[in-house]
Image (cartoon, rainbow, N blue to C red):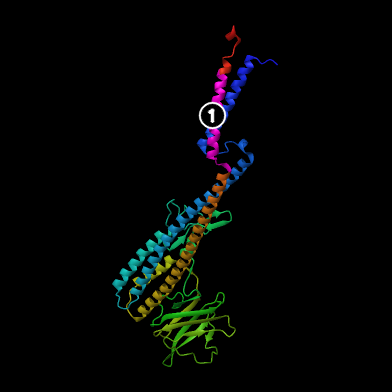
Amino acid sequence: MRISTTQIFQNGIDTLQRNQQQLNRTQLQLSTGKRILSPSDDPSGAVQSLQFRSGIEKIEQYQRNGTMLEQRLNFSETVLTSVADGLQRVRELALQGNNATQTNETRGFIAGEIRQALDELLQLANSRDPNGEYIFAGNDSLTQPFVNTGDGVAFAGDAAQRSLQVSSVRLIQAGDAGERVFMDIPNGNGSFVVLDGKENDDEGNQGTGVVSSTAFSGAWPPGEEFSVEFSDEDGELVYRLKDSLENTLVPKDPESPPPAYVSGQPIVYAPEDGGFSIQFTIEGRPADGDSFRVVQAGGQDLFRTYSQLADALAQPVSGASDQARLNNAVNRALVDLDQGLGRLLDVRASLGSRLQAVENQNRINEDQLLQLRSTLSEVEDLDYAEAISRFNLQQTALQAAQQTYVQIQRLSLFNFL
């Protein structure tokens, strides 16, 4: 078989190019540190590499979500701590203003400070995170959640809350609904409230009766309210407990004499069929015709509690009956403030548990990331010792091929003529 000069040269060039290509590939592996440069290098390894990278990207996104959650929850905790501090200060001012040694002027100063606390509360309720989003506005985070309408503060946000995914199976709430934190708070003892005076009675009670304590058990009868009315009969102060239809419940027998009022002695009503019982204590001496209403507790917002307390302290006190009205108003405000503080403690406890959950999940994600990255490294990372040895061998082969080609290139019949 004849071998032409052209064929010899072409074979030499092909060998040089093949050796150069192999050397270049090894150099690229050494520079990148990766064994797999294209799927054809290791098809099954390339598929595994893609799967591991996808898993790593997902967990890294979960980690970013967790970091965002931590920042938002920590910011919320800071705001709620300030709210609780302000509430404690208002409570101190309420106790201070309820002291009989205060004058109308000093109570006015206290009312002014409470109104300043109300402004601060509204500002805190409308707090924004570093991204400019209102933290208590729910999903509508770019809309101011609390608006002073002139008749009080209204909630204009969204009750729903966003949740962020911190693992493939775990969602954690990113905030708390402002309506629940500041607005929808039970007043009174959570079951009922005792109000002095008849409904729509501007004059109010004329005596010195002050509600000092309340207690309730069972389920409140739907739509019902009660009243206790005092009257002076033959020089003795007695009371009657009635329902919303003006039916006398105490005494049970209308022909029986009504019980005598004793300051500090509980007034109790528990129907024979059971289901609930009411107990409240009045101290001082109500006047003839005075009354107290016992109504089911409802929702009260902190803003209204602050405002009502400031209004009560700003009212001039000119006698014992005025002082009693002030005492009743402040006592109700103190109970409502305690309910608000209880709600804040519940929300902060929930925040703390969510923060703990995020921190635990972040640690789990870090462990998973470490495992995935280690496995990915085993699949696609280069064995440097083997690669360097192969590089030296390929370099030697290339040099030998180059030298051989040079020698073959000199072969010609003309050299022998």
Which sits in the foreground, 252 or 24? 24
- Residue depicted at x 46% and y 83%: 229
Indicate whether residue 94 is drawn in magenta.
no
Residue type of the residue flagged with mark 1: Gln
- Can you name the residue that lies furthest to the top here? 417
Above or below residue 414? Residue 236 is below
Report which residue position mark 1 lands on. Answer: 395
Above or below residue 91? Residue 243 is below
Above or below residue 372? Residue 155 is below
Query: Which image quadrant is residue 333 in?
Result: bottom left
Q: Residues within 10 Å of mark 1 (few under 14, many from 20)?
A: some
Q: In which quadrant will I find the C terminus? A: top right
Residue 108, percent from left and from top: 31, 70
Indicate whether residue 390 is drawn in magenta.
yes
Q: Which residues are magenta?
A: 379-406
- Numbered disc 1: secondary structure: helix
Residue 163, percent from left and from top: 53, 56
Residue 148, percent from left and from top: 42, 60
15 horizontally vs 142: left or right: right
Question: Is residue 20 visible from the viewing direction of this image?
Answer: no
Q: How many marks?
A: 1
Residue 3, percent from left and from top: 66, 16
Above or below residue 143? Residue 88 is below
Question: Is residue 409 visible from the viewing direction of this image?
Answer: yes
Which sits in the foreground, 157 or 237? 157
Predominant SS along the magenta part = helix
- Can you name the residue that lies furthest to the right here? 1
Q: In which quadrant will I find the N terminus? A: top right
Which sits in the foreground, 62 or 69? 62
